[in-house]
Amino acid sequence: HHGCAEYGSIKSPSFPEAEVLSKIDELDARIYEMEEALKTVEPGEFSAKVWALDNREIYKMPDLEELEPETYDNEENP
């Protein structure tokens, strides 16, 4: 997120390596927001809207071990 002027960057990345680092930093910030939003959410439920992620609700996947075998294992899809 440091590659964006709205977050205080003086200018956009000027070479490929800087662009990659900028995108990794942005991804890290988004994953952090998702993890924080899901801390109090039960599996199979959505979080409250997350302002930092464009007011999206984030879904917490249920653990596969807790699902009944027929919900994810069938003969058509081995």
Image: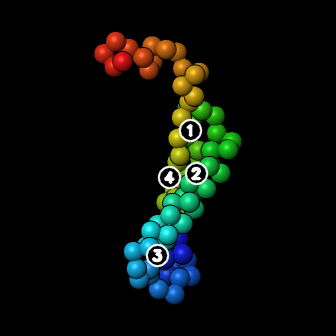
Question: For the residues carrying marks 4 and 1, which lies nearer the camera in this image?
Answer: 1
Disc 1 residue type (three-letter): Lys
Give the Cα separation between the discs numbered 2 and 1.
Answer: 10 Å
Q: How is the image coloured?
A: rainbow
Decide: few, some or many residues near mark 2? Use Cα within 10 Å; few <14, some 14-19, many ≥20: many
Closer to the N terminus: mark 2 or mark 1? Answer: 2
* Residue lying farthest to the right in this orientation: 40
Q: What residue did someone put label 1 on?
A: 60
Question: x, y (%) of residue 30?
Answer: 54, 58
Circle 4 SS class: loop
Task: Quadrant for residue 8, please give it.
Answer: bottom right
Q: What residue did someone put label 2 on?
A: 34
Residue at 36 percent across and 18 percent down: it is: 78
Q: Which mark is residue 56?
A: 4
Give the Cα separation between the discs numbered 4 and 1.
Answer: 13 Å
Q: What residue did someone put label 3 on?
A: 18
Vertical placement of residue 24 versus 62, above or below:
below
Give the side of residue 43 with respect to residue 72, left or right: right
Residue at 46 percent across and 75 percent down: it is: 18
Task: Quadrant for residue 44, please give it.
Answer: top right
Disc 4 residue type (three-letter): Arg
Circle 1 SS class: loop
Residue at 62 percent across and 49 percent down: it is: 35
Circle 2 SS class: helix
Give the side of residue 36 with respect to residue 21, left or right: right
- Pointers 4 and 1 in contact (C-beta within 8 Å): no
- Pointers 2 and 4 in contact (C-beta within 8 Å): no
Residue 50 visible within the image: no
